Amino acid sequence: MKHSLFIAFFLCLGSFASAQQLTSPDGNLSLEFMEQADGVPTYRLDYKGKPVLTSGRLGLLTEEADLTRGFKQTNLERASVDNYWNPVWGEYNRVRNHYNEMTVTLEQPETGRILNIRFRLFDDGLGFRYELPLQRKMNYLTVKDEVTEFNLTGNHKAFCIPGDYDTNEFAYTTAPLSEIAVDMEKRIAKKSYESKAEGGLTVQTPLMMKSEDGIYLNIHEAALVDYAGMLLNVDDKQFKLSAHLTPDKLGKKGYLQLPVLSPWRTVIVSDDARDILASQLIYNLNEPCQYEDTSWIRPMKFVGVWWEMFTGEGKTWAYSDFYQAKPGITDYTKLKPNGHHPANTAHVKEYIDFASAHGIDGILVEGWNEGWEDWASYRKDRQFLFNKAYPDFDVKELQRYAKEKGVQMVMHHETAANAADYERQLDEAFQFMVDNGYHAVKTGYVGYIIPRNEYHSSQWMNNHYIHVARRAADYKVMVNSHEAVRPTGLCRTYPNWLAQESARGGEFETMGGNDPDHTCILPFTRLKGGPMDYTPGIFETRLSYYNGEKPNERVHTTLVKQMALYMTMPSPIQMVADLPSNYARFPDAFRFIEDVAVDWDNSWYLEAEPGDYITVARKAKGEDEWFVGGITDENSRTATIPFSWLPEGKQYIATIYEDGKDADWDTNPQSYRIRKVVVTPKSVLKQKLAASGGVAISIKEADKAEMKGLKTIR
Amino acid sequence: MKHSLFIAFFLCLGSFASAQQLTSPDGNLSLEFMEQADGVPTYRLDYKGKPVLTSGRLGLLTEEADLTRGFKQTNLERASVDNYWNPVWGEYNRVRNHYNEMTVTLEQPETGRILNIRFRLFDDGLGFRYELPLQRKMNYLTVKDEVTEFNLTGNHKAFCIPGDYDTNEFAYTTAPLSEIAVDMEKRIAKKSYESKAEGGLTVQTPLMMKSEDGIYLNIHEAALVDYAGMLLNVDDKQFKLSAHLTPDKLGKKGYLQLPVLSPWRTVIVSDDARDILASQLIYNLNEPCQYEDTSWIRPMKFVGVWWEMFTGEGKTWAYSDFYQAKPGITDYTKLKPNGHHPANTAHVKEYIDFASAHGIDGILVEGWNEGWEDWASYRKDRQFLFNKAYPDFDVKELQRYAKEKGVQMVMHHETAANAADYERQLDEAFQFMVDNGYHAVKTGYVGYIIPRNEYHSSQWMNNHYIHVARRAADYKVMVNSHEAVRPTGLCRTYPNWLAQESARGGEFETMGGNDPDHTCILPFTRLKGGPMDYTPGIFETRLSYYNGEKPNERVHTTLVKQMALYMTMPSPIQMVADLPSNYARFPDAFRFIEDVAVDWDNSWYLEAEPGDYITVARKAKGEDEWFVGGITDENSRTATIPFSWLPEGKQYIATIYEDGKDADWDTNPQSYRIRKVVVTPKSVLKQKLAASGGVAISIKEADKAEMKGLKTIR
């Protein structure tokens, strides 16, 4: 386009009105975009006629250009989309993508610079992003700040963790916004790699809130690509939130070159908490799957040589004792093994035997490779070798044995947060996996990041995680990343990125414990970005950690709640986390974990209240099998479970795994009962859950003979 | 060792005297190590009975431990070594490694920490390093400072460039130390990626100096591995120098874990400047070759699609015009070619034809791969693709054609200093090279480094360059790195790392020019660390740069001096840098470049004075061919060239390429004459060199018929 035409084009559009409206397909949500004085762009959001976000600013401040003011609206485009897509795996086999869209073009008459803001309003919420199209007056940008505001209508109850550039592994605070600061400060995990956000009060996203009039709000971001991860600044007096981008350690919040598409800023809204859990908005705002062939991506359950290092008597990831091995070890054959290194061939075979006998797909082995003697140094250019096993771990023999037993080996790549060196070794590491029959990897990023100017959530690292997932796909390797930036739905685009940790997982039961309401919050927060490898299924709830006898170092649930987590914490890769010897003591209860699916045709959220309880039913993908899971917080409760989501005209046998009558997470966690009943789509089950208890139900079509003598739920 | 024994061991050694002496094998150099008050370790160095370095401090200051004071000497070990090794390539086919060694063990009684300092005294100079053996009271260290001092005896004449963390591409200052500050400030290149060292006055190493009483001193470092590059702080009043380690952008000067071996600090000393050039001290202090098979490492000459981008009429590395191509280009087939992109198949074939016709081994092509339209952004996560050629560069056809013509393709990997992304792509890049018949690569690091906390000379980057060289070796690829940290002799250890730039090379004749004495200094400074890809051989000395007509933008030598540079700037990879069309105009002179070797059995430095002149003779490796090269600075001179280094009992024909009688770099640079004479080992040639002129001589055994009518030099 010639420059003269270009200018004329905008002049003729210069008379647009400054306030623009957009409504959701069902009409419940409405958004207003408006330019304020000085050409400051703002927006507000209403739900069912009442404000949920009052007027808040939009814009981007960079070293090269101030894109927060001085704008005139010069164009507006609208679109409506209603289509479906099929996830490779997930809670649903078909997702509706239904929204109305409005794209506002803003120009600064003084500078000639152009900023587009694209809004998408779904029935379940809002997504918007900044778009900087190619233009003559801007090219390179260094981000100083994103000014996006989310201005709340009151002192909502928040479910939140502190804003931190490096970690998400915090216990949740549940409190009115005015009170979160004090509570969060108490709960900050004492982690060596904690990097609390600078400035005032901040929280991590997804941030879950509930207003006094019962509106549920979830604020997060979608499609975090080539951009800094977003925390939220919290004004706990005015109840205003604003974007807080993760800087690098040089203080820069992003390096951009046009064209730029920011991540989507997302606001999921409903007056029914179940809608928050069911929302697919964040996935809808991510790009479709980038891989042509996804046949090699297979959801799985796995056991692991892992839990015993947390609970066992001094068992270690390392092959030899720390002090003895300190000598920047290169030749492990000359080191004396410490005798308590579980990642050895014979012991791994026991796990393979167990997995094979119980139909568990895979086995993870941590501590198999050289480097653990001295791994969190932050001083080493090379920490781990990803193609060099300890002398007692026979890669080839285990490949042979696992194949013979029909079990998949899952590799572990702990990087000690040296992402730079991981990238150096990445091709070799993946080739080594392929050569030795591994098709899934658990990655880890414990510690401060190398390159040393980066945080776990800064821009370069966000690209790193994606690079690893994409490169893994070249080798048909599935990825389960721990300690990475919290997810933003990118597993739609890169579905071999099965799950992440990026929150306080089950392992923390051995490190201070997880509150009984922890897993009643995670599905409303962390899980909105994607599945979590929470590591459920701990049947032996009495723990000792490094010989400690601290009262909180035990599992804060009943045994049955651990089973229910397979339903309420959906993930295409689920650990069967306890020791085989513990499962052997509860074979009837373990049956549920053997049976439960990890991929689904459909899901129905039956009951939900953040921090209190969740009940969900799901149909296994491609199978006529259904499962129900319900959990509660520290309060026992009676769940009301309808079965109307079952196909009509049939009867079903439901095997109910329930807390024993006297069960209680604190006093009697391992009490459980298993009963079989007949259910129909008309049935409604009243089910008692113990304090921090649960219920897990597996359902199949009824065989007449099996039904005999069974009670039918009305 | 049990702890009690450990302590006893030191107690019994606690009575060592605090001053220790070490002398060089020939007795000319003597070193004294002494503990000063407060247990501060110091050293001094004498040459032929006179001090060259007065008492200077030694030590390392870290965040975790102060290793600069409070020491008691608890052990001393001495050793003498005299052996030989054979370089894979170089100026000599056999190098003597002859030194006396003294290792001082220092313990801090208060902390129990131990520091060893290992001194090696060769006939040609001193090397010493810090060694931190494994010990109980230290493990991880973060370097704050290295306090190593080099205290001079007077206001020496220095040949130096400014201390800079990112670049070495400066013109040299020649001045007494008291006057370098003002001169260097004037000469600082106006480069966008310049990062002048912080604090006071600093200079880069190798630093060449000459004392008033005629002692030549060269200070540098050897074996820079996993450590920050060293600049020198200059006290230009007291004439004291001290180590200035390159920090990262977080201000840390290194991250160490015990055991630690620092790079060697080197001081080459002689009263004969030729000894400085001939010194192999820095190579001797590097580790032996790490590769078992080196048969694939082959020194070479190469032409390149390169010089025309500096001198041509708007010719570009980029395939399409900048603005047009800016759109974060992904599909180059849809872009309009700009029509002045020399890296196209047809044009490259012309170079291949030329190389083939003239026996030049290889051809480098710059601008062959996607990304040049917009390459110095510092904002892109991915700048270049190293396996994707522009549409007009047919990789497969050129592979076929080059093979048919017997010419090796040399690849170019400009990284735009995004070392992180280069590492991401490294395996793919080298595999692509191997798959397409490339076995040598020129790497480039123009711009600010990504990871963004690093400088070109900071610790992480120093490891990066080594990583690239080692990984290249896995693919049997030779490396010629530009804009990397200046070398420290690591090409002994990794001999596929043939050469580096890391100084102001020939290309600067188009960017401000190189002073006539520039190449009379480089062999005394930059070249002490390893060969330089200076790109000699520019016959057409009148240049225009981007249509500029600036008086300095021409070659500051005579044509003959360009030929002599192949001898005075020895490198196993030498560019034949001018355009084929220019060589075609001077076929008789070009004959020397065709003939000259790049690898040597032996070398004899005949005359030398830093900044003034160099004359050197060499024997081609494995051939009965000898070559002589001589250059001078802006002053014409008469070189005195003995031939006593030729084997006795024979006569030889010498082809002398000399400056024409009226030659002068400024007024008549292209005047030259070629004459043949007979020489014997008794001959001494008086040879006139023009201002910034040279002489180049090729010598073969005399054939009687050829000798007929030739004058014999007496």
Image (cartoon, coloured by chain):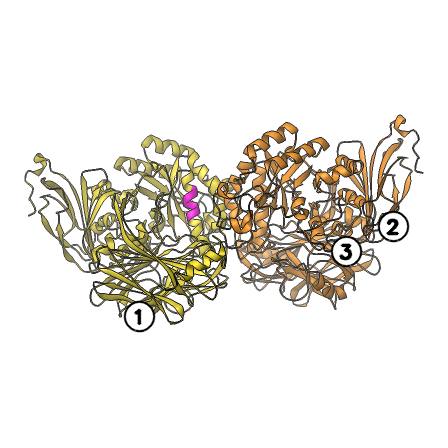
Chain colours: A yellow, B orange
Residue B23 falls inside the magenta stretch: no
Q: Are marks 2 and 3 on the same chain?
A: yes
User: Which of B97 and B517 lies nearest the eye of the viewer?
Assistant: B517
Q: Secondary structure at mark 2?
A: strand
Report which residue position mark 2 lands on. B637
Q: Which residues are magenta?
A: A466-471
Q: Amino acid at mark 1?
A: Phe
Residue A510 falls in image quadrant: bottom left
Q: On what subunit does the disc labeled 3 rest? A: B
Q: Secondary structure at mark 1?
A: loop
Q: Are marks 1 and 3 on the same chain?
A: no
Q: CA distance from mark 1 to mark 2?
A: 83 Å
Total label count? Answer: 3
Q: Mark 2 Cα within 10 Å, few/some/many (few <14, many 20+)? A: many
As drawn, is A391 to the left or to the right of B32? left
Q: Mark 3 Cα within 10 Å, few/some/many (few <14, many 20+)? A: many
User: Which of B552 and A21 lies nearest the eye of the viewer?
Assistant: A21
Q: Which mark is residue B217?
A: 3
In this view, the residue farthest toward the bottom is: A237
Mark sitting earlier along the chain (2/3): 3
Overall secondary structure of the magenta section: helix
Q: On what subunit does the disc labeled 2 rest? A: B
Q: Amino acid at mark 3?
A: Leu
Report which residue position mark 1 lands on. A239
Residue A468 locus on image (x, y percent) = 43, 45
Q: Is label 2 or label 3 in front?
A: 2
Q: Are marks 1 and 2 on the same chain?
A: no
Q: CA distance from mark 2 to mark 3?
A: 25 Å
